[in-house]
Image (tube, rainbow, N blue to C red):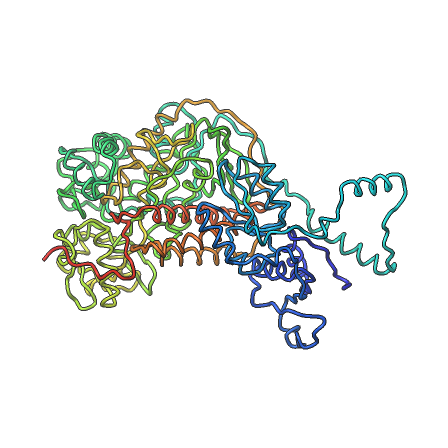
């Protein structure tokens, strides 16, 4: 046995690898070869593997031994060797809702096809944690499957394949009565079935066993304080909810993983905030039309009937936001503030796509930051509000259908924060796509946490792509506001031809989903699309955008290169007219919620308004509930940290799948393929989250859950509507809808 010999099992093989590589050693992995191969793949070492048959001298040459870090001995478990990829495909065909978990001693292709691969302990844990009615197909020794069926009758536990599942000959020989007799003999001081080995071999074997115990029982890090802070309410970024709750006399904590202010989604909003003015019925009609009549009329009523009052109360009376005026803007800050509190008659209302009239308040093309910064400053000065920057919620604390708080992480320390009510306002899902207008770290956290806690989600298939994101070298440089097209900007293809009149009678002011698909089609046909701003005084009307063009080396007089980019999720956590979810004391507002206002497609410049109206209503409703601390979940951190590249590589894989199969256009067959890949990815990530607590890993978990929800909802909806545009490989290019 080598001097660094180490005993391992399927549950800790990865630790054995890590132990070796930390010391610069190679790994000679004795049976099982499939476990060794799967562990190597798990650690990103698939290119460092060579197999060795000790009875075949030519199976591995000296060069291969030197060049590769992992040498696999040609041995395997006869039980797990029997499973095939076809068994996974067959169980999914027979049970479409089944999750598949297999032992890591199965062949590599079987592990790839399954949703999860895990040790015996992992398999037991997955079934134990499953919700009643869930279906799990188990690919391992048949007696374990039978035990799980008896222990958890509420879960539908199936053998992966009746013909392939067999019992283990070695395990079959462990007779309980015989085992009891051996233990009784040991207690009496009489040793039975002793195998004599040479002293030096015994010593090395003991070292190997001790080494396994050492790496598998590493000291537990109790660096995370677990004191229970009561009397505080957890809020997540939605400042309107914090304001309303604080006004009602509650103590409010706003926990945001963003750094202020650029890390918040609201800060990036460009176009503006729509209001009803004196015609809420027409505003409602525009919202319903943009949604292809899929929006909830009652939810739209809540929005348009409260729009003017909410904007007047918060943005004018409380924050003094200096919205643009019809006359030239003053450059004097004091004068701007004075103007903001005077007459509303001279406000410069803009029009954007699918709006039938001018109703959008704006500040240049950077309205979000002109609202967000004074909002933060106001709350910072409020005695009842505490803002925690750089703080992420990892998991909700819940019990019997009620949410009691959340596990918060900051600088690596995790602790429970309890609250009378919890409001989720975690923003969007931009990190799920390669091109997005969202800020960094928009990973669908609130949606994933709520779904894991048991809250309903809805309309997840409706992902809106903004048609005019400025692209430089294939990457999104910045968003070009819809207001530019509202003021006369024209879209031209690579041939210089204006094309939007061919697609819709409203041309550049058609609904976003129509424009996004048209831009995509013209880019594919002619190589590029540019936004022609020569018809307007661009530098004077949009000085911020003109400066950003200059910062990226773009001569806007030649047109701005644009492409569709993921912009807004119209669905999310299902809520009522007060932001209440289906879980007690859990609220959701903003982009992570599904109010019903947007349906299958969002009308431009309604997101800030929706967040403001629902934020105020949720905050008012959430105020006043007593804090009830309960036992918080234990987030484990007993395994070594993963390399920085781990989450990055998994995110790359996730984005590629979402971009290719769940993007602007979707093929039903591709949606099915995407779900298979995303299920496997989620299974891999879940296995790591069980033993590690790191923000990047939880963000990856949240992103994989949210991506799977989007793909699943898209696959289940066979109606092509709004942002959910179904095509097939045989489809012809869409005919223009207008002359």
Q: Is residue 270 above or below residue 113?
A: above
Residue in the image at 59% along x and 68% along y: 48
Across and down, in percent, residue 532 comes to 17, 60
Across and down, in percent, residue 588 comes to 37, 35
- Horizontally, is 419 left or right of 21 in the view? left
Looking at the image, which is closer to me, 565 or 339? 565
Q: Is residue 594 above or below residue 515?
A: above
Across and down, in percent, residue 307 comes to 22, 33
Of the 4 image quadrants, the one containing the C terminus is bottom left
Give the residue at the far right of this rendering: 189
Q: Is residue 91 visible?
A: yes
- Horizontally, is 153 left or right of 472 in the view? right
Occupied quadrant, residue 6: bottom right
Residue in the image at 73% along x and 49% along y: 213
Of the 4 image quadrants, the one containing the N terminus is bottom right
Looking at the image, which is closer to me, 77 or 739? 77
Occupied quadrant, residue 79: bottom right
Q: Is residue 622 above or below residue 688?
A: above
Across and down, in percent, residue 16 comes to 67, 57
Q: Is residue 343 visible?
A: no
Q: How many marks?
A: 0
Looking at the image, which is closer to me, 98 or 357? 98
- Horizontally, is 684 left or right of 499 in the view? right
Give the residue at the far left of this rendering: 739
Give the residue at the far front of this rendering: 163
Residue in the image at 39% along x and 38% along y: 237
- Horizontally, is 255 left or right of 491 in the view? right
């Amino acid at each position: 046995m080598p001097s660094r010999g180490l005993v391992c099992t399927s549950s800790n093989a990865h630790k054995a690898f890590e132990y070796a590589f930390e010391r610069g050693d190679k790994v000679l992995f004795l049976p099982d070869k499939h476990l060794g191969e799967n562990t190597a793949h798990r650690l990103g070492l698939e290119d460092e593997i060579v197999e060795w048959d000790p009875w075949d001298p030519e199976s591995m040459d000296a060069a291969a031994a030197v060049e590769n870090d992992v040498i696999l001995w040609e041995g395997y478990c006869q039980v797990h060797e029997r499973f095939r990829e076809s068994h996974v495909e067959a169980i999914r065909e027979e049970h479409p809702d089944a999750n598949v978990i297999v032992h890591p001693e199965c062949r590599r292709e079987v592990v790839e096809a399954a949703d999860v691969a895990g040790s015996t302990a992992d398999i037991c844990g997955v079934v134990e944690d499953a919700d009643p009615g869930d279906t799990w197909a188990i690919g391992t020794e048949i007696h374990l499957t039978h035990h799980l069926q008896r222990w958890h009758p509420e879960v539908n536990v199936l053998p992966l394949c009746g013909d392939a599942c067999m019992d283990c000959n070695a395990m079959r020989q462990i007779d309980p009565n015989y085992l009891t007799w051996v233990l009784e003999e040991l207690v009496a001081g009489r040793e039975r079935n002793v195998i004599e080995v040479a002293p030096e071999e015994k010593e090395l074997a003991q070292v190997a066993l001790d080494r396994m115990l050492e790496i598998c029982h590493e000291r537990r890090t109790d660096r995370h304080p677990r004191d229970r802070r009561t009397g505080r309410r957890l809020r997540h970024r939605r400042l309107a909810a914090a304001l309303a709750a604080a006004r009602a006399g509650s103590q409010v904590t706003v926990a945001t993983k963003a750094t202020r202010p650029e890390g918040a989604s609201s800060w990036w909003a460009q176009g503006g905030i729509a209001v009803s003015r004196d015609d809420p019925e027409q505003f409602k009609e525009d919202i319903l039309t943009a949604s292809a009549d899929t929006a909830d009329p009652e939810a739209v009523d809540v929005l348009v009937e409260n729009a003017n009052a909410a904007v007047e109360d918060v943005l004018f009376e409380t924050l003094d936001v200096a919205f643009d005026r019809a006359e030239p803007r003053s450059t004097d800050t004091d004068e701007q503030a004075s103007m903001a509190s005077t007459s509303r008659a001279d406000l410069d209302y803009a029009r954007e796509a699918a709006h039938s009239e001018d109703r959008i308040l704006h500040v240049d093309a950077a309205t979000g930051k002109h609202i967000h910064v004074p909002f933060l400053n106001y709350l910072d000065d409020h005695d009842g509000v505490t803002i925690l920057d750089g703080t992420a919620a990892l998991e909700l604390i819940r019990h019997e259908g009620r949410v009691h708080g959340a596990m918060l992480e900051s600088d690596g320390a995790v602790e429970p924060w309890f609250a009378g009510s919890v409001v989720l306002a975690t923003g969007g899902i931009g990190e799920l796509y390669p091109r997005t207008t969202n800020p960094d770290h928009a990973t669908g956290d609130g949606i994933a946490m709520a779904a894991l806690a048991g809250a309903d989600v809805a309309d997840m298939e409706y992902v809106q792509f903004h048609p005019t994101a400025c692209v430089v070298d294939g990457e999104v440089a910045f968003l070009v506001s819809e207001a530019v097209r509202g003021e006369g900007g024209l879209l031209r293809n690579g041939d210089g031809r204006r094309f939007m009149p061919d697609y819709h009678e409203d041309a550049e002011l058609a609904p976003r989903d129509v424009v996004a698909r048209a831009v995509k089609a013209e880019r594919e046909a002619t190589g590029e699309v540019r936004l022609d701003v020569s018809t307007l005084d661009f530098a004077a009307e949009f000085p911020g955008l003109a400066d950003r063009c200059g910062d990226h080396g773009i001569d806007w007089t030649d047109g701005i290169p644009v492409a569709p980019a993921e912009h807004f999720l119209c669905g999310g956590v299902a809520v009522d007219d007060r932001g209440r979810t289906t879980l007690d004391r859990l609220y959701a507002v903003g982009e992570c919620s599904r109010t019903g206002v947007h349906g299958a497609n969002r009308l431009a410049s309604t997101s800030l308004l929706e967040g403001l109206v629902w934020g105020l209503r949720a905050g008012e409703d959430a105020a006043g509930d007593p804090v009830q601390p309960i036992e918080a979940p234990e987030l484990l951190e007993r395994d070594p940290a993963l390399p920085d590249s781990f989450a990055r590589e998994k995110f790359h894989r996730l984005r590629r799948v979402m971009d290719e199969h769940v993007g602007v256009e979707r093929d039903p067959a591709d949606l099915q393929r995407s779900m298979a890949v995303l299920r496997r990815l989620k299974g891999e990530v879940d296995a790591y989250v069980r033993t590690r607590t790191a923000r990047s890993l939880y963000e990856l978990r949240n992103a994989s859950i949210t991506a799977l929800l989007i793909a699943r909802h898209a696959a289940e909806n066979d109606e092509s509507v709004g942002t959910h545009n179904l095509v097939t490989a045989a489809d012809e290019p869409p005919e223009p809808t207008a002359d």
